[in-house]
Image (spheres, rainbow, N blue to C red):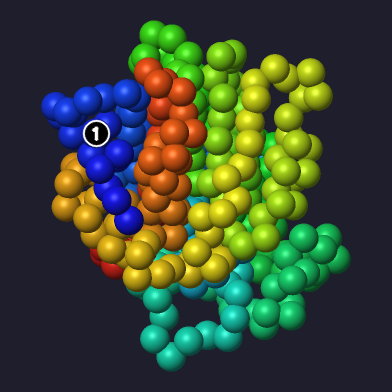
């Protein structure tokens, strides 16, 4: 993968810049629970507190960024946390799950079949009967409050730039972060999402549910940069991530931000963006995939 287009826009003194690229490192807003998950969690934590609820229950896999952030936020704010984890209990839990336990999260492992019921009110009621009253967050923490929280990302970007950027680009899992960016952006900004899932066409409908019909900001998805599916990777992607991290101050990982930056580099190569475009790439965090251990 030719890194030259990205080198031209991320190095301090680009040779012949035809674009301006800014990286918004959301993972630096808090030491242990930064990233887009912080924006998604804060409105939900406020809601839980307003309901006098001191326990949070949510769902995720063994490497879930959401579970990682939820456990850290729970520890920080003195809230109990319960993670319903997809799959049988492993002989050696992932670093994500080990951190969650150290932070006080109670883990409950369920079969993949049961996990498919994570949005079933009857099954959630069974979980609450077992664990007691809790504020329930969906997988990935993606709900209306989370979308509202992510709106602030776009507002902060525009405030710091002093103008709307031409493009906002971010990785996409559930679509809640992208929906927030779309809702709070103003023309001429266009929003581009890079899904990390294979066959992510369904996200157009998922995201559209959160967007007012009369909203005037254009948005689209670059569907061809999933590298085979969630958490899948290739030697080319891994090489790109290594070379990018050797060049830049803010590291990326191969599950979310790596795929986004790969896509951005490729689209720059193709001339997808107009000359002199102001592009803001959202670094949504997730550096746990680099096996970086945090307290």
Against 234, is 69 above or below?
A: above
Residue 121 is left or right of residue 95, and the answer is: right
Residue at figure coordinates x 44%, y 53% from the top left = 259
Q: Residue furthest right?
A: 122
Residue 261 is left or right of residue 164, and the answer is: left
Against 91, is 74 above or below?
A: above
Quadrant (top left/top right/bottom left/bottom right) for the N terminus: bottom left
Quadrant (top left/top right/bottom left/bottom right) for the C terminus: bottom left
Q: List x then y, in percent, for residue 262.
A: 39, 50
Residue at figure coordinates x 54%, y 19% from the top left = 189
Number of labels in the image equals: 1
Quadrant in the rendering for residue 277: top left
Residue at figure coordinates x 20%, y 44% from the top left = 248
Q: Nearer the viewer, residue 152 or 13?
A: 13
Against 34, is 235 above or below?
A: below
- The answer, for residue 279, to whether it is visible in the render is yes
Quadrant in the rendering for residue 122: bottom right
Residue at figure coordinates x 41%, y 26% from the top left = 279
């Amino acid at each position: 993968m030719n890194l030259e287009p990205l080198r031209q826009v991320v190095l301090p003194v680009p040779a012949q810049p035809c674009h301006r690229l800014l990286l918004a490192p959301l993972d630096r807003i808090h030491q242990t629970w930064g990233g887009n998950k912080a924006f998604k969690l804060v409105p939900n934590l406020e809601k839980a507190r307003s309901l006098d609820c001191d326990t949070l229950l949510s769902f995720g896999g063994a490497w879930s960024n959401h579970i990682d952030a939820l456990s850290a936020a729970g520890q920080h704010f003195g809230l109990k946390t319960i993670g319903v984890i997809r799959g049988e209990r492993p002989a050696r839990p992932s670093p994500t799950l080990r951190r969650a336990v150290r932070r006080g999260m109670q883990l409950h492992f369920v079969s993949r079949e049961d996990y498919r019921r994570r949005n079933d009110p009857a099954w959630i009621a069974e979980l609450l009967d077992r664990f007691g009253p809790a504020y329930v967050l969906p997988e990935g923490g993606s709900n209306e409050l989370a979308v509202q929280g992510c709106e602030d990302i776009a507002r902060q970007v525009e405030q710091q730039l002093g103008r709307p950027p031409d493009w906002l680009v971010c990785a996409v899992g559930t679509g809640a972060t992208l929906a927030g960016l779309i809702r709070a952006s103003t023309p001429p900004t266009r929003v581009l999402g890079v899904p990390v899932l294979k066959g992510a066409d369904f996200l157009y409908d998922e995201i559209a549910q959160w967007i007012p019909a009369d909203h005037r900001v254009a948005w689209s998805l670059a569907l061809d940069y999933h590298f085979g599916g969630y958490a899948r990777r290739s030697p080319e992607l891994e090489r790109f991530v290594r070379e990018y991290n050797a060049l830049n101050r803010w590291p990326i990982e191969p599950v979310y931000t790596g795929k986004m930056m790969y896509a951005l580099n490729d689209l720059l190569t193709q001339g997808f963006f107009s000359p002199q475009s102001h592009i803001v790439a959202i670094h949504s965090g997730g550096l746990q995939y680099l096996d970086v251990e945090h307290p």
